Amino acid sequence: MATITPRDLAAAARVADGLVYGAGLAGVVAGGLLLRDGQTSWAVVSWALTFTAGAGLRLAAAAVRALAQLLLQQEKMNADIQHLAGESGRWHH
């Protein structure tokens, strides 16, 4: 299994953000068409579902960004630990 990098996660978050806008546009258009046809209740349902889907995608994108930041911090800590372990080995000899 391939290792997921923070860069991969950032790209996934950008895709999710793009999907938020795409879903929002589709929902507004669909709701508008339904409203124009006199189906007010279905228009409201369409807008509500679109809002819910967009909010879920936005939340997922935020979670992925947070995970990417955690992975970056972990990589920095691992590098610091390796550096400190190398330094302590030099002093004991």
Image (cartoon, rainbow, N blue to C red):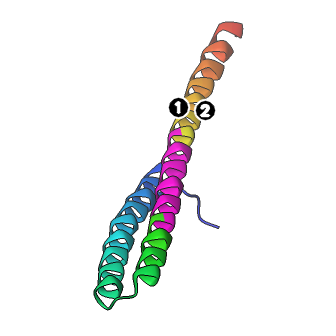
Vertical comparison of 26 with 1: above or below: below
In the rendered view, does 38 fall on the left or right side of 3?
A: left
Amino acid found under the numbered disc labelled 2: Asn
Q: Position of residue 93 (x, y in %)?
A: 70, 10
Q: Residue at x 51, y 46 (%)?
A: 68
Q: Mark 2 and mark 1 in contact (Cβ < 8 Å)?
A: yes
Q: Position of residue 86 (x, y in %)?
A: 61, 21
Residue 76, numbered circle: 1
Q: Residue at x 35, y 86 (%)?
A: 34
Q: Nearer the viewer, residue 9 or 92?
A: 9
Q: Position of residue 21 (x, y in %)?
A: 33, 66
The residues tagged by marks 1 and 2 sit, at their Cα atoms, a distance apart of: 5 Å
Q: Position of residue 71 (x, y in %)?
A: 56, 42
Question: Dot 1 surroundings within 10 Å: few (below 14), some, or many (20 or more)?
Answer: few
Q: Residue at x 37, y 76 (%)?
A: 27
Q: Residue at x 41, y 80 (%)?
A: 43
Q: Chief secondary structure of the magenta span?
A: helix
Vertical comparison of 5 with 41: above or below: above
Is residue 39 visible in this depiction of the protein?
yes
The residue pinned by badge 2 equals: 78
> Circle 2 — which element?
helix
- Boundaries of the magenta span: 52-69
